[in-house]
Amino acid sequence: MSESASERTANWVADYLGAWRSNDPDAIGRLFTDDASYLTAPDAEPRRGRAEIVAGWIEDADDPGAWSFDWHVVHETSEIALVQGRTEYPAERDYLNLWVIRFAPDGRASEFTEWYMPRDHEG
């Protein structure tokens, strides 16, 4: 039995958060298809392919425990999920996030775009 769209999104986000906490290259790589694209900022060139995504993630890695992330699904279909979140970096600032995740049939992301708006830290 295949998983529902909501299960797929929840599992993918859980795996993303695990990779974010660990910065483990294998965990990061498992999230994306071989030819995936990852857009990290509106005016940036997307990272293309799993190897480039993993390398860029490691280069920009956050320290484990330096952040927290709360999220919920805004909309999802069998092919795409929109996730709204809030990332809190207690030592610096907070970000409001919108993730656009386009899924391959196997549940990995073929495209990932993260939109974010920085906010002054509220703590």
Image (cartoon, grey):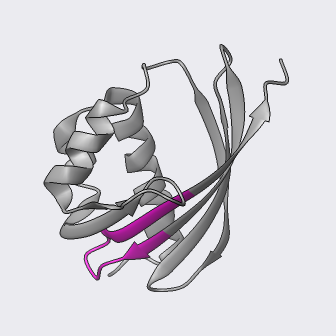
Quadrant in the picture for the C terminus: top right
Q: Is residue 93 above or below residue 20?
A: above
Q: Is residue 75 above or below residue 87?
A: below
Q: What type of secondary structure mainly makes up the magenta span?
A: strand
Query: In terms of depth relative to the viewer, which is nearer, 63 or 74?
Result: 63
* Magenta stretch: includes residue 26: no
> Residue at coordinates 69% horizontally, 40% vertically from top-left?
95
Query: x and y percent of residue 22 in the render?
Result: 33, 28
Quadrant in the picture for the N terminus: bottom left
In the image, is 3 to the left or to the right of 116? Answer: left
- Total tally of numbered discs in the picture: 0
Query: x and y percent of residue 62 in the render?
Result: 43, 26
Where residue 17 sits, quadrant-wise, is: top left
> Residue at coordinates 19% horizontally, 38% vertically from top-left?
25
Where residue 121 sits, quadrant-wise, is: top right
Q: Is residue 25 visible?
A: yes
Q: Residue furthest right?
A: 122
Query: x and y percent of residue 122 in the render?
Result: 85, 24
Query: x and y percent of residue 93 in the render?
Result: 71, 26
Q: Residue furthest front?
A: 43
In the image, is 11 to the left or to the right of 115? Answer: left
> Residue at coordinates 60% horizontally, 70% vertically from top-left?
82
Where residue 38 sits, quadrant-wise, is: bottom left
Query: In terms of depth relative to the viewer, which is nearer, 53 or 77?
Result: 53
Q: Is residue 27 visible?
A: no
Q: Is residue 75 above or below residue 113?
A: below
Q: Residue furthest bottom?
A: 78
In the image, is 80 to the left or to the right of 88? Answer: left
What stretch of residues is rendered in magenta?
Answer: 101-114
> Residue at coordinates 21% horizontally, 41% vertically from top-left?
55
